[in-house]
Image (cartoon, helix red, strand yellow):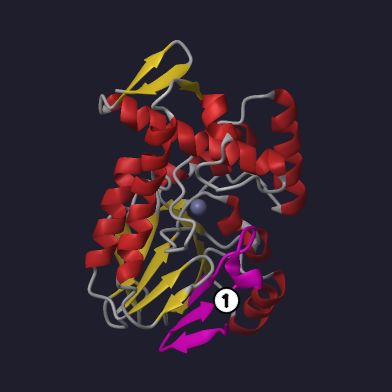
Amino acid sequence: MKDRQFGRLRFICGENRGKYPFNHSLYIDGGDARVIVDPACSLEKLSRLRDKDSVDMVWLSHWHEDHFHYVNLFGDSPLWISERDFPPLTDIEIFLDWYGVKDDSHRDYWKKVMSDEFNYQPKSQARFIRDEEEIDLGQVKVQVIATPGHTPGHLSFFFPAEELLFLGDYDLTAFGPWYGDVASSIDETISSIRRLKEIPAKKWIACHEGGLFEENPGKNWDNYENIIYERERKILEFIKKPHTLKEISASWLIYGKPRKPLEFFEFNERVLVNKHLERLEKQGRIIRDKDQYRKV
Ligand SMILES: [Zn+2]
């Protein structure tokens, strides 16, 4: 996979196909301002970009660490993000609360990871990007598309003249969408996927793995959404007999099998399952009796 230039827009592909902790980034030479969107592709590439092409501002599609990884390379450049996604960037305690990390020892572990590996430094200010805002960078116009679900303030960016759509973390991967944070929403994720699918683009950039689509992702859209229903189906099947969250998570219905590092993936499995259980309970499709869940 290679970096690609489309007019004034540049797809910068991330290390290891943009798999966590990396992503694919987008550089916009807007004429009046030059922007890096989600600076987490590669330390080397972003350092070179800063020194050779220059960067005036940093935009984040959302608050996750695999998108702001190298933001500190750009020093005092203004940071732009949705107001809804800014709180976790202001304080590591809020950051961990938003992930739902409760246990003290886990919090200590993640604090260290965030500061040592992701260069987490609390931010005190940002310019808030408004939902549906049209941003004129001089030579490039950007249509902001609010796509909540993955995170509450997740934003995608459409470039009408270039017919290019930056999807952010609606990444069309085979794993499927993430909605495991405290404020994530499965229903909003579904709406956002459907909305993005309807945008009249000719090129699509997703932040992980496949990354660049130069033809309509077509069936990828439906496959991606269907993974949500497939996860749900497996959970419902499993709780024909009553089970606790712990028991459901231990059967790895979402990841398929235990993955390492175990602490990381056990946590992910549990929070994703829990989101489904919350939604199914709200829909009246399952019953909770104390800590056990059962299909109606
Ligand atoms: Zn994310």
Residue 6 highlighted magenta (yes or no): yes
- Along the line of sight, which residue is nearer the eye, 57 or 111? 111
- The location of residue 256, given as percent across then percent down, is 55, 48
Position of residue 133 in the picture relative to residue 259 (left or right): left
- Along the line of sight, which residue is nearer the eye, 123 or 152? 152
Residue 167 highlighted magenta (yes or no): no
Say above or below: 18 vs 148: below
User: Mark 1 packing: few (<14 Cα in 10 Å), some, or many (20+)?
Assistant: many
Which residue shows up at 59% across the image and 46% down it? 123
Q: Is residue 181 visible?
A: no
Which residue shows up at 72% across the image and 75% down it? 44
Residue that badge 1 annotates: 13
Q: Amino acid at mark 1?
A: Cys
Mark 1 close to ligand 1, CB under 8 Å: no
Which residue shows up at 71% across the image and 24% down it? 104
- The location of residue 173, given as percent across then percent down, is 47, 63
Region of the chain picked out in magenta, as a range: 1-27
Say above or below: 292 vs 32: above
- The location of residue 280, given as percent across then percent down, is 32, 30
- Along the line of sight, which residue is nearer the eye, 62 or 124? 62
Snapshot quadrant of residue 264:
top right
Q: Is residue 165 visible?
A: yes
Q: Quadrant of the C terminus?
A: top left
Numbered-mark total: 1
Which residue shows up at 38% across the image and 83% down it? 214
- The location of residue 212, given as percent across then percent down, is 45, 77
**Residue ranking furthest to the front:** 241
Under circle 1, the secondary element is: loop
Say above or below: 6 vs 152: below
**Residue ranking furthest to the top:** 290
